[in-house]
Image (spheres, helix red, strand yellow):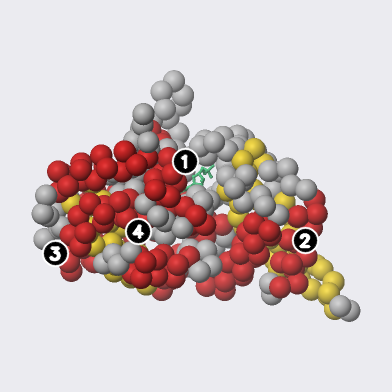
Amino acid sequence: SWTMAAYREQAIAAIRAQVGDQKVICGLSGGVDSSVAAVLIHEAIGDQLTCIFVDHGLLRKNEADEVVSMFRHQYNIPLVHVDASKEFIGELEGVVEPEAKRKIIGRLFIETFEKEAMKIGGVKFLAQGTLYPDVIESVSFTGGPSVTIKSHHNVGGLPARMNMELVEPLRELFKDEVRKLGRELGLPEHFVGRHPFPGPGLAIRLPGGVTREKLDILRQADAIYLEEIRKAGLYDTIWQAFAVLLPVQTVGVMGDGRTYESVCALRAVTSVDGMTADFFPFDMNVLGRTATRIINEVKGINRVVYDVTSKPPGTIEWE
Ligand code: XMP
């Protein structure tokens, strides 16, 4: 019968056969897919693999540190950590249109990654954590109008530029299978079970434009929200949950003072594959507790609303 242990062995043999004694580089995003791919490849070829983590400064709270310390200390995988947040946030400043944000992030990501890859030198193979749904989604739908709703840049951009052969050991797997494989490889449960996170990160959760200050506010609100969801035992039931910081200010009252601060929207959905989704029907007490905490603990937010839009007609992300 088909098990993850067997898949692991088979994948390791295939990676060894493909790359021989050549060097491989792998882009880490901080997420589950690229991490599982990297750990698997490292198991197959050891230090022939170097990981490059382009940190765009748009990750959730603590995420960058967690990934770096897991790779360096737990797995001893050679890792180049590039803090490119200054460049990314600098170029995003004043950009409001969602696709324009994606383009900037995609381009900077490729440029930064390429620069680091050149420094390593003599690399023939590029590893990616491409999943089966990424493979399908990048092929246009048949029977429907060919409209790009959002240009995900996980698939395509990098290999086209780099003239390297691809190593994609997760190409046949769905998200839940990648999580199983991650557990099989000994990745910590809280890491493997993480909700999906978009490549452009928090940039597409800041309608109205990205600034360091807004990122900071959003990160704090998001962390409180996820903490309350975990406390309520709902994290694994929900496909994806996150906060969005709106470019709207409203009036509030705190103590005996008037406040005029930003609105935070909370989103949570259930889904099988992200293609369709239902808003999550929270117990209002969970939302109430979260709202109280966010407003009390995060300076800059004085109102919290909950998004009850399903997909379609809404998308999961706001941008
Ligand atoms: P939407 O918002 O299109 O999201 O309903 C479906 C899933 O895709 C993620 N998403 C992205 N992932 N690059 C990514 O890597 C992107 O540009 C992007 N936009 C959305 C979203 O988080 C959800 O899981």
Residue picked out by circle 3? 121
* Real-space CA distance between mark 3 and mark 1, rounded to the nearest whole angstrom: 35 Å
Mark 3 in CB contact with mark 2 (< 8 angstroms) = no
What label sits on residue 95 in the rendered view?
A: none
Where is 40 relative to 279, above or below?
below
Left or right of 264? Residue 102 is: left
Place of residue 91 in the rendered image (x, y in percent of width and height, measured from the top left): 41, 67
Q: Which is more N-terminal, label 4 or label 2?
A: 4
Q: Which is more N-terminal, label 2 or label 1?
A: 1
Q: Which is more N-terminal, label 1 or label 4?
A: 4
Point out the frontmost of discs 4 and 1: 1
Mark 2 in CB contact with mark 4 (< 8 angstroms) = no
Residue picked out by circle 1? 176
Residue shown at 51%/37% (left/top)?
A: 273
Tell me the kind of residue under disc 3.
Gly
Place of residue 161 in the rendered image (x, y in percent of width and height, measured from the top left): 22, 51
Q: Quadrant of the N terminus?
A: top left
* Real-space CA distance between mark 3 and mark 2, rounded to the nearest whole angstrom: 52 Å
Local packing at callout 4 (Cα closer than 10 Å; few below 14, some 14-19, many 20+) is: many
Residue shown at 71%/73% (left/top)?
A: 297
Tell me the kind of residue under disc 2.
Arg
Local packing at callout 3 (Cα closer than 10 Å; few below 14, some 14-19, many 20+) is: few
What label sits on residue 28 in the rendered view?
A: 4
Residue picked out by circle 2? 289
Tell me the kind of residue under disc 4.
Leu
Extreme residue in the right direction:
256
Q: Is residue 265 visible?
A: no
* Real-space CA distance between mark 2 and mark 4, rounded to the nearest whole angstrom: 35 Å
Residue shown at 24%/46% (left/top)?
A: 12
* Real-space CA distance between mark 1 and mark 2, rounded to the nearest whole angstrom: 30 Å
